[in-house]
Image (cartoon, helix red, strand yellow):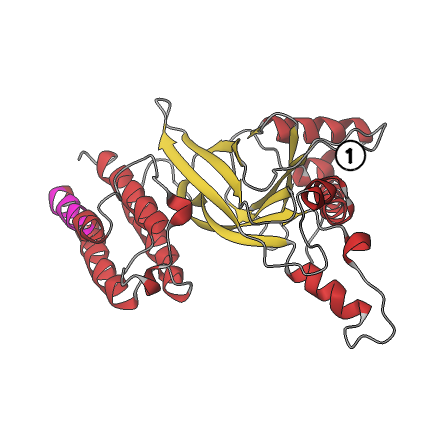
Amino acid sequence: MKIYSKLQIFLCVTILSASSIAQAAPKGIESAATAGSDLSTPAPMIAFMQSRFSLDEKGKISYRYAVTNDKKNKQDIVLVIFDEVGQIIGSRDDRDFEIEHGMDSATTESILKENAAALFTPPDWEGSITFGMYDEDNIRIGWNPFRDDVTGKSKDGIKPGVKLAGFGFYSHALPGIGSVQMEGNSSIPKMLKYDPNSEVSVIDQLLIIEENDHAYGNAAVPAIILQTPFDPVATLEQLQDHIKQWTTSELLDRAFHSKLRRSLQEAIKAYRKKDTKVAIEHLETTRQLIKKEQPDSDKSDPQNEENEILYVTRGLVIDKLAARILDFDLKYVINHTGG
């Protein structure tokens, strides 16, 4: 049976409460309404996350994010959530501590602050970390506008047409692709209309609001766990398993995946035989295959990433973010095996 700690439950409630606040807080909606928005007909929310990742001089991998709220939206973004990402530097898992020592309120508060300090957070926002919703080895990260516990008032979210940077953290894990959820502050009381003669019930209206008060996107997140000492075979095998998932989410063409898989498999065979030179040649070949399809795959600073259209509508065989991540991971393996 899975054990959930007091802090884990507390943070889950905190994130769920923040989500409820996101649906109930009227301030951003009133601002949008002033601009003439028709709140009675919610449209699908459009939001983007831009990912940047780099290796620093101490060997840590920096992950930085910016969130854009599309100008067509009618609500502020008031919650940004990563589900199931790899461990980040500075975060603390309280479960073993609680089992061994117990947990009091002071310790809980200390861990909350310690985990929040592990995150990069924009001004007037606050971040939190919880553990093991689905996988005990992963974490869940959430950011929301700062809320004053005394007054109950929250700072503004990300308004339509605004891009907010400053989210992020450090990790020792290489990037893969994960999902990010960006929640709006749809004001349910303002958007509901009760009409006994209407064929649209209040429940149906609630479902419509719920379907249109958030957006999902892809982001670079810690996913490939590095061993000490570094093991290129274990790293590439994890990477193979990870990119296989991309074929089912319109990030990677199946035929192109087969080419990449064969090339990576040859590199793995060479590493197992201690033939580093041949292994690196295969990895460089793989990078060239990627660069042929996405010329900017080796650039660390994405350009207009949020405007990219899915490859299926453009005849591309690999998503731009996926290409950048894969190139970064392969280059890391090459550089750490003498390349």
Question: Can residue 211 be seen at all in this image of the molecule?
Answer: yes
Q: Is residue 169 above or below residue 176?
A: above
Which quadrant: the N terminus? bottom right
- Crowd tier of the residue under label 1, counting other residues whose Cα lies within 10 Å: few below 14, some 14–19, many 20 or above: some
| Residue at the spot of label 1 | 103
| Image point (42%, 43%), residue name | 225
- Relative horizontal placement of residue 210, taking residue 288 as reference (left or right): right
Q: Position of residue 327 (x, y in %)?
A: 27, 44
Q: Quadrant of residue 203?
A: bottom right
Q: Position of residue 250 (x, y in %)?
A: 39, 63
| Image point (16%, 44%), residue name | 280
Q: Position of residue 50 (x, y in %)?
A: 44, 41
281 is within the stretch colored magenta: yes
- Magenta range is 277-286
Instruction: Assign a secondary structure to mark 1.
Output: loop
Which quadrant: the C terminus? top left
